[in-house]
Image (spheres, rainbow, N blue to C red):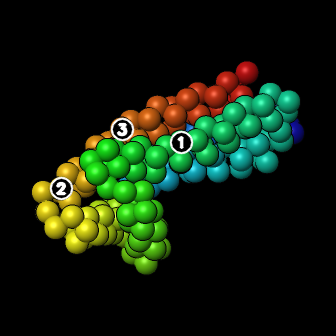
Amino acid sequence: MYIGDYFINVELILKAVTEGLTLVIMLFGLLISPILPGLTVIWIAALVYGLVIHFSTLGWVMFGIITVLMIGGSLIDNILMGTRAHKEGAPWWVLVIALLVGIVGALLIPIPIIGGVLAALVTLFGIEWLRRKDWRKALAAIKGMLIGWGWAFLFRFIIALVMIGLWMVWAWA
């Protein structure tokens, strides 16, 4: 398209704007990853980018790897939290109940720390206290779950950085 003596490449402008918006959304996903599903936000940004710009062969490969990382990173949270709490003596059935209550809590109260995490921790403490009749052991299970959450955050953060890096290779190759 010509405006006066200048040629304006609309497709190039669309690509630059799409890349900029995608990167901003991905960085937002990185920042919220400790308390919200930031990996999912990054994945959705990559999907929308691919749909807008159109997937190339490299795009499909990178998006496939980004998808695997998003699924793995989302599962690692529950695995690490549960494993640490289990090492502190909480049986798996208690951890499944706490996880389910956490999911329901997150749906009912969409503030993640209050709705999901706090609901799961309170449930874990309550069941462990009733089951073991020892508040110290119940507290140790919560401590284990929180330590697992800390490790999960670290892994999710690293995975988020890798996902963003893969998108950059895809977008700027």
Q: Work out whether residue 76 or residue 168 is closer to the camera in this orientation and state it.
A: 76
- Going from N to C along the chain, the mark reached first, 1 or 2, is 1
Q: Residues within 10 Å of mark 2 (few under 14, many from 20)?
A: some
Q: For mark 2, what is the residue?
A: 137
Q: For mark 1, what is the residue?
A: 73
Q: Residues within 10 Å of mark 3 (few under 14, many from 20)?
A: some
Residue at 61%, 37% in the rendered image: 69
Whether residue 11 is visible, yes or no, is no
Indicate whether 100 appears above or below 146.
Answer: below
Mark closer to the observer (2, 3): 2
Indicate whether 156 appears above or below 82.
Answer: above
Q: What amino acid is found at the position of numbered circle 3 in the picture?
A: Trp
Q: For mark 3, what is the residue?
A: 151
Alpha-carbon span between mark 1 and mark 2: 29 Å
Rendering coords of residue 138 (x, y %)? 20, 59
Assign a secondary structure to mark 1.
helix
- Going from N to C along the chain, the mark reached first, 2 or 3, is 2
Q: Is residue 129 left or right of residue 7?
A: left
Q: Work out whether residue 124 or residue 2 is closer to the camera in this orientation and state it.
A: 124
Q: What amino acid is found at the position of numbered circle 2 in the picture?
A: Lys
Image quadrant for the N terminus? top right
Q: What amino acid is found at the position of numbered circle 1 in the picture?
A: Gly
Residue 155's quadrant in the figure? top left
